[in-house]
Image (cartoon, rainbow, N blue to C red):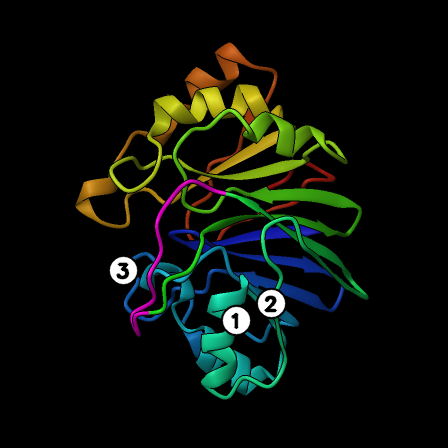
Amino acid sequence: MDIRFLGHACFELSDGDTRVLIDPFLTGNPKAAVEARDVDPSAILLTHGHADHIGDTVDIAKRAACPVVAIVELAQEISGEGVEQVFDPNLGGTVKFDWGWVKLVPAWHTSTTPKGTINTPAGLLVGIGGATIYHLGDTCLFGDMQLIAHRGNPIDVALMCIGGHYTMDRLDAVEATRLIEPRTVIPCHYDTFPPIETDAEAFRSDVESATSSKVQILQPGETFSPGTGAA
């Protein structure tokens, strides 16, 4: 199973012919590694409805004829835009596919779509290719991260916001790593815009000196394979 970082908070999880796309903010993203027309996902998963996360979801889902998973109010908006297959769990809900599963878990943030739909932000637990991935979404630090991460399978990879200003910063993200105890952390949601610029190398140093987790810094377009540790 491969994890490709596409910029900001967008990732593509690949297992064989399956490609799961998370938060496809590509058009208008100055750090995007690809254009929206270049991805062909098997499914799209959303953490919340801010413009820098919902991004190109509707256009990609229509073109690829793939399902979208989003929290219920956001799912209703996307369905109303003409996406044919939309799954609408709420927090705690799990959607199963032939390639694995996704569970929505809490994230502390806000969210209103560009069209004005208010929706509750979420984190995503994703089971794919024998690995458990935790995309924290946009969030501040909160103690229930520990409960979320230890409720089921150990977390192989945490996709973690570190940019501050709109989410937790790199210092709070070190504490989040302590709570979650993932094998690997991939930082995201930083350096896309001036307010969220931060020092990813300092984050790596702090995490690896304070915890047993390893930090894999990916540039947009780079891939990490949890089974091999290769980037």
Instruction: State the image quarter where residue 138 is shown.
Output: top left
Residue at image mark 3: 30
Quick check: can you spot residue 62? yes
The single residue placed furthest to the left in the displayed view is: 194
Q: Amino acid under label 2?
A: Asp
Q: Is residue 188 above or below residue 172?
A: below
Which residue is drawn at the image coordinates 47% and 47% (left, top)?
137
Which residue is drawn at the image coordinates 63% and 80% (left, top)?
85
Mark 2 crowd level (few <14, some 14–19, many ≥20, 10 Å Cα) = some
Q: Is residue 151 magenta?
A: no
Is label 3 or label 2 in front? 2
| Numbered disc 2: secondary structure | loop
The answer to the question of whether label 1 and label 2 lie on touching residues, with beta carbons closer than 8 A, is yes
Residue at image mark 1: 75
* C-alpha separation, residue under disc 3 versus residue under disc 2: 30 Å
Which range of residues does the magenta coloring cover? Answer: 107-116
| Numbered disc 3: secondary structure | loop
Of the residues under marks 1 and 3, which one precedes in the sequence?
3
Quick check: can you spot residue 33? no
Q: Position of residue 51 (x, y in %)?
A: 32, 64
Residue at image mark 2: 88
